[in-house]
């Protein structure tokens, strides 16, 4: 099996690129390191292509190991042929290999095995070859303790025939090939289902090749919850006729008996197996598709812009037990925590308002990170009307709470804040998500962040592995400050294991801040390979200005040559000089310094913006103050909301009413929407038209294509105030 050729064809890349990538991976280089610092070797392969290569390489090597094991097992039985060997060589999946191996597996405690022990395989051959019609007399020769009469012997021989038919790889291959095109997936509700969520799948019917991933996953979940029953419809008569054509000769006197064998083999052995294989293939395809979509969504969330150099109040809203508060320094340290009854009424409310104003003034809070859960809109109303007017320098923004409760009760949170209540930890997490989304979200299981599609129904091992790779790519893309990074985010840095990440934090506690990257080699357990993989992604504001850039230490000499060549004394001056370099200048410099153009370009970019953060700025949606509950949302309203999740069938929009509205893909654009991600990204602010509202089922259907030039629905409670402001503005102008 030519692994390099297979992967290069799948990615449509040159074989030399794949070969180089595999060699680097085998030498212990990580995907982020190769993507960033070995661009010349792989001819600028993307991190996604390298990640695919890494995963496919492992899968194909496992496939090769299984092929060899099956070859050996068949060969030891003395049954290996050139045809079997060729079939094994051409097999592309583990399932194909297992189908080839099926006839040679040692069968235990089966009807066929019992018949074989009684030598009824010889009687089976007699049924195939005899022309006399004297089967009953022949069967009497095989009577034994297990098979006590001629009838049971004939039945045992038929079991052998059915088993042989079932084990015939050609039959299975042909039936599967046709079924992949023609098989139909059918679903229907069971009587008195536990949930009405699956009502739309009652009497569902579609070609299995056309079933979208989200429908397959929904039907699978419905079956697990015993709300649905599924069935795969095959062309049974055609399949049985094809088998009978090869199994039953016209001159055979036992045609009816052999028809029964074909019927038994197909109905009892072949069809259930193929149905399972087809649905497993559909689920695997759906899972892979959903995981890819999940990865896209997760990356968007992880790379949301941080809010730097601000004091933030994490605000976890609540109604009955009050709102939990945590004020954080610009570095994320907890300055104080408290509980506010801002969502209560009467005296408690007035006291809560004074309390919040005092806290904001005492700690000079710049931004309130307001959780978007229950009580969020009620808290917002009081903040806007009674608190913020007294502290005009303070603003607020809604932050997604998804996964905050998971983090609050985790071992990580317990270790970070052992003296804090679980609910207070939630407020800290909400605040830190605004301060630095990436650093905070890596502490939460990615499947709990709320940006997936049926994530809890997917293969959890495969999902976690894929998402871990996506987090690694995001963390290394941004880089981390070595002197403030937690051990949790350090574990995602290229080349760092959990133990090395903890060793770095222990070293930092004992010796203080790192002064330079080279000091990493003094950390217990650190070797040259780990240093090579991680150094470029760790930032240090210390002795060497280059340590605070994405330039790898192996390229420091080149960086200094560039600075010297252009008489740049201070790296801060590099932007004015190097920004004017043209492509031809860089190519000339590349030859002069004997370094690849791709790597040189990266070095120059880092010198121009040495401490750049690749994440973009965020903007918050304008939410109506009087539309804070689903009962207040009416069809025809035009609102503004934030994209919180993207699925295969649409996007979920947070319009601030405790439940997200569905923007179906058919309502996104007048153009055909094949992939929602081509039109929307998580965190986007969108103007939406309310199509329908069902408060009982908490269902809101939205549209962006129906908005066109419609203005936002006026906030009734604040309409007169807005009109006064507009009048004053007009007079001033």
Image (cartoon, rainbow, N blue to C red):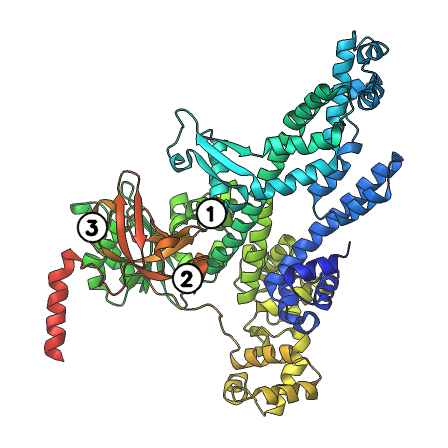
User: Which residue is at a point 16% across and 46% down the rendered structure image?
Assistant: 347
Depth check, mark 2 against mark 1: the one in front is: 2
Question: Relative to residue 484, is residue 334 drawn left or right?
Answer: left
Q: Residues within 10 Å of mark 2 (few under 14, many from 20)?
A: few
Residue at 60% over, 64% down = 47
Asked which secondary structure carries label 3, the reply is helix
How far apart are labels 2 and 3 at the CA level?
46 Å
Residue under pointer 3: 351
Marks 3 and 1, how far apart at CA: 43 Å
Residue that carries the numbered disc 1 in the rendered image: 453
Which quarter of the figure has residue 685? bottom left
Residue for point 46% across, 40% down: 218
Give the class, few, some or many, for how many residues have Cα within 10 Å of label 1's Cα (few <14, many ≥20).
many
Disc 3 versus disc 1: nearer the observer? 1
Whether residues under marks 3 and 1 lie with C-beta atoms below 8 angstroms apart, the answer is no
How far apart are the two marked residues, 2 and 1, measured between alpha carbons?
18 Å
Sequence-first tag of 3 and 1: 3
Residue nearer the viewer, 299 or 430:
299
Describe residue 79's horizontal placement relative to residue 638 as left or right.
right
Q: 361 or 296: nearer the eye?
A: 296
Secondary structure type for disc 1: loop
Name the disc covering residue 679, or none: 2
* Residue at figure coordinates x 49%, y 46% from the top left: 212
């Amino acid at each position: 099996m030519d692994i390099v050729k297979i992967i290069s064809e799948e990615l449509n890349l040159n074989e030399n690129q794949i070969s180089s990538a595999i060699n680097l991976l085998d030498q212990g280089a990580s995907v982020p390191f190769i993507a960033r610092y070995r661009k010349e070797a792989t001819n600028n392969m993307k991190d996604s292509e390298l990640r695919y290569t890494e995963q496919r390489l492992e899968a194909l090597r496992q496939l090769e190991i299984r092929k060899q094991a099956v070859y050996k097992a068949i060969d030891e039985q003395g049954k290996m042929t050139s045809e079997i060997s060729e079939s094994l060589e051409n097999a592309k999946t583990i399932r194909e290999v297992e189908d080839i191996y099926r006839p040679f597996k040692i069968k235990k405690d089966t009807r066929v095995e019992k018949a074989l022990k009684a030598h009824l395989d010889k009687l089976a051959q007699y049924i195939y070859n005899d022309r006399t019609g004297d089967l009953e007399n022949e069967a009497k020769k095989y009577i034994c303790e297990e098979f006590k009469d001629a009838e049971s012997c004939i039945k045992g021989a038929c079991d052998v025939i059915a088993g042989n038919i079932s084990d015939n790889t050609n039959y299975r291959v042909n039936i599967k090939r046709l079924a992949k095109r023609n098989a139909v997936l059918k679903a229907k509700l069971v009587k008195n289902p536990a949930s009405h969520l699956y009502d739309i799948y009652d009497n569902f019917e579609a070609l299995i090749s056309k079933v979208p991933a989200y429908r397959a996953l929904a039907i699978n979940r419905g079956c697990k919850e015993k709300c649905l029953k599924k069935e795969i419809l095959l062309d049974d008569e055609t399949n049985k006729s094809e088998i009978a054509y090869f199994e039953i000769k016209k001159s055979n006197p036992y045609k009816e008996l052999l028809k029964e064998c074909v019927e038994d083999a197909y109905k009892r052995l072949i069809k259930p197996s193929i149905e399972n294989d087809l649905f497993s293939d559909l689920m695997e395809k759906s899972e892979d598709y959903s995981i890819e979509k999940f990865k896209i969504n997760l990356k968007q969330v992880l790379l949301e812009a941080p809010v730097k150099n601000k004091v933030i109040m994490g605000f976890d809203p609540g109604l009955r037990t009050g709102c939990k508060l945590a004020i954080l320094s610009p570095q994320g340290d907890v300055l104080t925590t408290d509980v506010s009854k801002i969502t209560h009424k009467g005296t408690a409310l007035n006291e809560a308002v004074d309390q919040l104003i005092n806290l904001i003034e005492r700690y000079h809070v710049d931004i309130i990170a307001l959780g978007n859960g229950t009580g969020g809109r009620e808290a917002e109303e009081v903040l806007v009307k009674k608190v913020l007017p007294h502290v005009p320098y303070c603003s607020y923004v809604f932050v997604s709470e998804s996964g905050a409760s998971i983090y609050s009760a985790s071992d990580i949170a317990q270790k970070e804040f052992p003296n804090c209540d679980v609910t207070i930890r939630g407020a800290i997490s909400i605040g830190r998500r605004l301060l630095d989304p990436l650093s905070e979200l890596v502490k939460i299981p990615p499947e709990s962040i709320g940006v997936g599609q049926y994530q809890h129904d997917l293969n959890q091992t495969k999902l976690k592995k894929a998402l871990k790779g996506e987090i690694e790519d995001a963390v290394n893309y941004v880089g981390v400050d070595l002197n403030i990074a937690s051990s949790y985010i350090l574990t995602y840095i290229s080349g760092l294991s959990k133990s090395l990440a903890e060793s770095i934090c222990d070293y930092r506690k004992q010796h203080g801040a790192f002064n330079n990257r080279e000091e990493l080699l003094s950390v217990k357990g650190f070797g040259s390979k780990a240093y090579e993989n991680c150094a470029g992604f760790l930032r240090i504001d210390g002795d060497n200005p280059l340590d605070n850039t994405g330039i790898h230490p192996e390229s420091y000499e080149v960086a200094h040559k560039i600075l010297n060549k252009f008489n740049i004394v201070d790296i801060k001056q590099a932007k004015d000089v190097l920004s004017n370099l043209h492509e031809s200048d860089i190519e000339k410099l590349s030859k002069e310094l004997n370094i690849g153009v791709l790597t040189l370009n990266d070095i120059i970019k880092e010198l121009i913006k040495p401490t750049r953060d690749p994440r973009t700025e965020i903007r918050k949606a304008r939410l109506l103050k009087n539309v804070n509950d689903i009962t207040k949302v009416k069809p025809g309203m035009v609102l503004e909301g934030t994209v919180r999740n993207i699925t295969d069938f649409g996007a979920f929009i947070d319009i601030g009413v405790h439940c997200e509205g569905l923007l179906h893909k058919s309502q996104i654009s007048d153009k055909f929407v094949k992939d929602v991600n081509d039109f929307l990204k998580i965190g986007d602010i969108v103007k939406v038209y309310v199509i329908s509202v069902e408060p009982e089922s908490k269902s809101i259907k939205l549209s962006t294509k129906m908005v066109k030039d419609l203005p936002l629905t006026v906030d009734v409670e604040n309409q007169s105030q807005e009109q006064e402001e507009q009048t004053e503005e007009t007079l001033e102008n």
